Amino acid sequence: MGPEYGSVQINIDGQRDIYGTANASSSSMKYQQLLWSKTQLGPGDHQIVITRTAPGPISLDHFKITPLNNTIIPSSSGTGASIIPSEALVVDNTSNRIKYSGNQWTSVLTGNANVGFFNNSLQTTTSPGAAAVFEFDGTAIWYYSDVDFTHGFVNISVDGGLPERVSGYHDPVASQYLIWSRTNLPTGTHSVTITHSDVAGQFATLDFFRYLPSNATQPRGKDQSRKLPVDAIAGGAVGGAVLVVLCCGSVFFYRHRKQRRNRDRKDDWSIEPAPEMAERVEPYETTPFLMAHEAQASLTTRDTHDKSRDTSTSVGPHTAAFGAATRMNTHSNEGNSSHPIIDTLEDLPPSYH
C-alpha cells in the first residue's frame, strides 16, 4: 500500500457479478498488509482473478492459504497440478506441433485481457467437425483449456481409436482446467485428436497439452499398481545372499580363531615319571611327583535393542488471503512449468465469447 495506489476488484472461481474490492491507497508506504480474504471455500482447486479498477499502480506481495490435507499444490488445474508428474512437458496451443483443421480455429492473443490463459493465448472454434491433432512420444497425455457455460462437447480419440465424448461446460467459469487425460499408454509415438462435436455456436477450446515423455517416470493412477523394478528385486536378492555369506564366514573365522587361542594357552600339568625311573628301585629314597589342574571359564554377553515408530497427521480447511506490499507496475511469467501469474484484467468473462 502507498500514496497514489489504485483499487482492485477480486473475483474467485469465475462467479459472475460476485466481486470483492480492495483499496491499496495509503498516506504512507505500508508492507505486508491484508487487503482481502475469503473463507469457507469448498475442497478442491480454486482460481482468483484480480482486476485494477482505478488509476494508479497495484502490487501483489503474497497469498496466504490454509491448505486441505496439508498441501497447497493445486491438484488438477494449472501447469503445476500435483496429479501430474513433474517430468511432464507443456505444449502451448500456439506450438507448430499442433495441427488445426482449415481456418475453423481462432487464436485468442489479447495480452493482459486474458491472463488466465497459459501464455495469454487460447485456440477456439464454434464449427462442428473442427479438429486439432497433436503427436507426441510418451506414455501419458493431459488436455487443458478454459471451461464455461457457453462451451459444448468434443470428441477425443487416441491413435485413431474409439472417441470419448467430453463436455467443456462448466459454471462458474475457470481457466487452465484439466478437461481430459489418458495415462498408461505403451511407450512410443501417439496422436490425440480433439474434434468439435456439438451444435454450431457452442465453443470448443484448447489452451495447452501436457505429456509424459517415454523416458520419464510413469504416473501412478488408479489402474497402476506400485511395483518395484525387476532389477531392484534381483539386486536386493543378490545383495542379501552376499551379506549372509559374509556374516557366516565372519562367525566361523571368529570361533576358529578363539578355539585356536584357547588351545594354545592350555598347559599340560600332568607329570609322569620316565620309563627308566619307573623301573628303578632304591632302598632308602623315593622321588615323589605333583599333579595340578587348571579350570577355565568363559563369559558371554547379549545386547538387546528397542525400536519405536512415530506417526503424525494433520488436516485443515481451505481459506485464502491476498496481501500487498512493495510497489510493482509490471509482472511477468517465467518458464513453462511455473504457475501463471494473474495480473490485471479489463473485463470478465474472456473477450472471445
Image: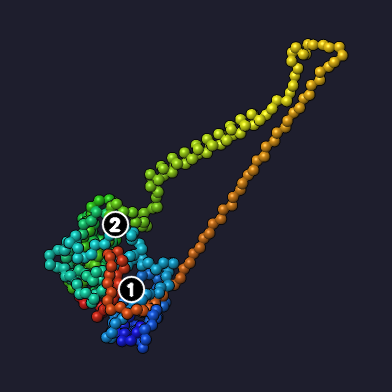
Residue occupying the point 49% across, 64% down: 313
Image side of residue 328 versus residue 102, left or right: right
In the rendered structure, find residue 47 and report the number of the disc placed on it. Answer: 1
Task: Decide which of tag 1 and tag 2 comes sooner along the chain.
Answer: 1
Corner quadrant of residue 338: bottom left
Q: Type of residue at label 1?
A: Gln
Q: What residue did someone put label 2 on?
A: 212
Corner quadrant of residue 154: bottom left
Pick the residue in front: 67 or 245: 245
Pick the residue in front: 160 or 280: 280
Q: Type of residue at label 2?
A: Leu
Q: Where is residue 135 in the image (x, y as percent from the top left)?
A: 21, 57
Q: Where is residue 186 in the image (x, y as percent from the top left)?
A: 28, 51
Image side of residue 287 versus residue 238, left or right: right
Corner quadrant of residue 33: bottom left
**Badge 1: few (under 14), some or many (20 or more) residues near its Cα, within 10 Å?**
some
- Coloration mode: rainbow
**Badge 2: few (under 14), some or many (20 or more) residues near its Cα, within 10 Å?**
many
Tell which residue pokes out farthest to the bottom in this image: 27
Quadrant where the N terminus sits is bottom left
Measure how far apart labels 1 and 2 are at the Cα level: 25 Å
- Tag count in the figure? 2
Residue occupying the point 32% across, 80% down: 327
- Vertical position of residue 159 compared to residue 61: above or below: above
Image side of residue 296 versus residue 197, left or right: right
Q: Where is residue 306 in the image (x, y as percent from the top left)?
A: 59, 52
Tell which residue pokes out farthest to the right in this image: 284
Residue 173 showing in the rendered view: no
Could you say whether the residue bearing mark 2 is in a helix, strand or loop? strand
In the rendered structure, find residue 229 and report the number of the disc placed on it. Answer: none
Residue occupying the point 54% across, 57% down: 309
Q: Are marks 1 and 2 in contact (CB under 8 Å)?
A: no
